[in-house]
Amino acid sequence: MQNDKIIHISTIDSTNIGLAQLNIKKVVKEGIGLLEGTILWADFQSSGRGQRGNSWESEKSKNLTFSIIFHPSTIKPNQQFLISQVVALGVAKFLSKYTDDISIKWPNDIYWREKKICGILIENQLGDDTIIHSIAGIGININQTEFTSDAPNPVSLKSITGNDYSLTTLIEEVQLSILSYYKKLQDGEIDFIRNNYKNNLFRKEGFHPYNDGITNFYAEIQDILDSGILILKDKNGLERSFAFKEVKHILE
């Protein structure tokens, strides 16, 4: 592999932490951070993290576990959800090359039908009025077929298609896919990103079960605000707003 923007290592505790440290070292040494789109890819993460503080199960050398960095200086801190949308869209587009029924479960998990194939964790370093850098930690289930954790619904590309995949090939493909959407963000195609994100949402139509931490209820998606707030309408016509971690899908 001749891609200078992909750093491949065997084992690390967390690619998000490792990539942030590499970026700091480069800033100290050269006065400038890593090139945008640089990836730190590990065969195994000993402390891989997911949303809600969960760990991410991944068998060594079977899946893609990596982080990618951006320096979105033109994006304001109150627009940071755009980074999440860009990364989710890039991964979803990449996976859709290999299988149908890929969607984005708010805010940024990637699903195949009712099963989770990818988790994404975005960490932004914010300045006074800018985003200094964004690091997206991404775990995509590729060749693993047995899952032993208590995660309720994992699935892999091999489980779906029956095929084995070259991780070296796929890491470059997913990098290009994410960067294609990031380029649209740089070009100011905000409406394109918003609309594509909404059109690719998991359970984007109809009433589905949710839990707000207290009760279960059925609702349909009304909108996703620029802040990332999810707007749901329940069967009584009441609209409710939820930030990250305030509501979750009930999987059927």
Image (cartoon, rainbow, N blue to C red):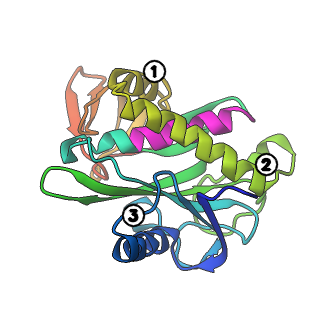
Label 1 neighbour load within 10 Å: few <14, some 14-19, many 20+ = few
Rounded to the nearest angstrom, the CA distance separating label 1 from label 2 is 27 Å
Give, as a single range, the part of the protein colored magenta.
Answer: 84-98
Q: How many marks?
A: 3
Q: Nearer the viewer, mark 2 or mark 3?
A: 3
Residue labelled with disc 3? 33
The quadrant holding residue 62 is bottom right
Q: Nearer the viewer, mark 1 or mark 3?
A: 3
Q: Secondary structure at mark 2?
A: helix
Q: Amino acid at mark 1?
A: Glu
Residue at 27% from the left image edge and 50% from the top image edge: 246
Residue labelled with disc 1? 205
Q: Position of residue 208 (x, y in %)?
A: 44, 31
Q: Is residue 128 magenta?
A: no
Q: Is residue 221 visible?
A: no
Residue at 73% from the left image edge and 53% from the top image edge: 142
Q: Residue reaching furthest right?
A: 163
Mark sitting on residue 159 = 2
Q: Position of residue 106 (x, y in %)?
A: 41, 40
The mark nearer the N terminus, 2 or 3, is: 3
Q: Amino acid at mark 2?
A: Ser
Nearer-the-camera pick, 45 or 145? 45
The mark nearer the N terminus, 1 or 3, is: 3
Nearer-the-camera pick, 200 or 124? 124
Q: Secondary structure at mark 1?
A: loop
**Magenta span main SS:** helix
